[in-house]
Amino acid sequence: MGEPRVRRANPADTDVLAEYNIRMARETEGLELTPGTVRAGVSAALADEGKGRYFVAEVDDVLVGQLLVTTEWSDWRNGPMWWIQSVYVAPDYRNGGVFRALYEHTVEAARVEGVPAIRLYVEEGNDAAQGVYQRLGMKPAGYVVYDLEPVE
């Protein structure tokens, strides 16, 4: 297996990104997402960086991993905080440095752009992912996330 190469996603990646999002939701949360909605959401992010920025990892010209960065304004930091979301690595490429390459690329992009903080959220029971994040230097932020969905 070759070394992962990270790049910005482009519209030609839409179908793979949508499929990986569907797989990730199924694997981590047992959710079945609506493919048309996911594809439209991926397309929207690719068309408007204000909605999100996808980075993808390729090995031997095959897209094998993804990571989405969204931005939240932090008044405490007077700067944008990046949130890592929609992380997925194809099963045959796990434990091969794909996520590390995506993560390191993201951290370097944040440094270059003067982003003061990067965060992510992870399912409470996803011990494998939490272990990866901690090995890369992240630590629990001490927050509990609440949700209201759908908003009615």
Image: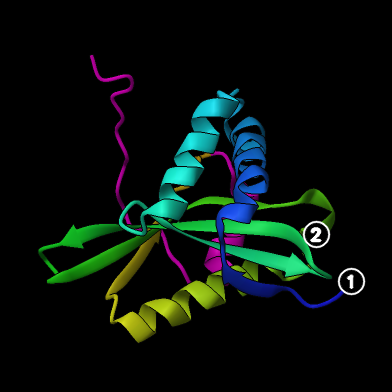
Q: Nearer the viewer, residue 139 or 109?
A: 109
Dividing the picture into quadrants, the one containing residue 18 is top right
Dividing the picture into quadrants, the one containing residue 97 is bottom right
Dividing the picture into quadrants, the one containing residue 89 is bottom right
Q: Residues within 10 Å of mark 1 (few under 14, many from 20)?
A: few
Q: Is residue 128 magenta?
A: yes
The outermost residue toward the right is 1
Task: Count numbered badges in the picture.
Answer: 2
Q: Is residue 62 above or below residue 15?
A: below
Direction from residue 97 to residue 39 in the image, left or right: left
Q: What's the magenta region?
A: 125-152
Marks 2,1: beta carbons within 8 A: yes
Circle 1 is placed at which residue position?
1
- Residue at 45 percent across and 39 percent down: it is 41
Relative image position of residue 130 (x, y in whole percent) = 55, 54
Circle 2 is placed at which residue position?
93
Relative image position of residue 73 (x, y in whole percent) = 19, 60
Q: Is residue 20 above or below residue 33?
A: below
Position of the N terminus by quadrant = bottom right
Position of the C terminus by quadrant = top left
- Residue at 43 percent across and 64 percent down: it is 139
Direction from residue 113 to residue 109 in the image, left or right: right
Q: Is residue 91 magenta?
A: no
- Residue at 34 percent across and 63 percent down: it is 82
Relative image position of residue 13 (x, y in whole percent) = 63, 53
Q: Nearer the viewer, residue 85 or 57?
A: 57
Judged by its main secondary structure, the magenta piece is loop
Residue 35 shows which numbered tag? none
Badge 2 or badge 1: first in the primary sequence: 1
- Kindly state the secondary structure of the residue where label 1 is placed: loop
Please state which amino acid type lies under the numbered disc 2. Answer: Tyr
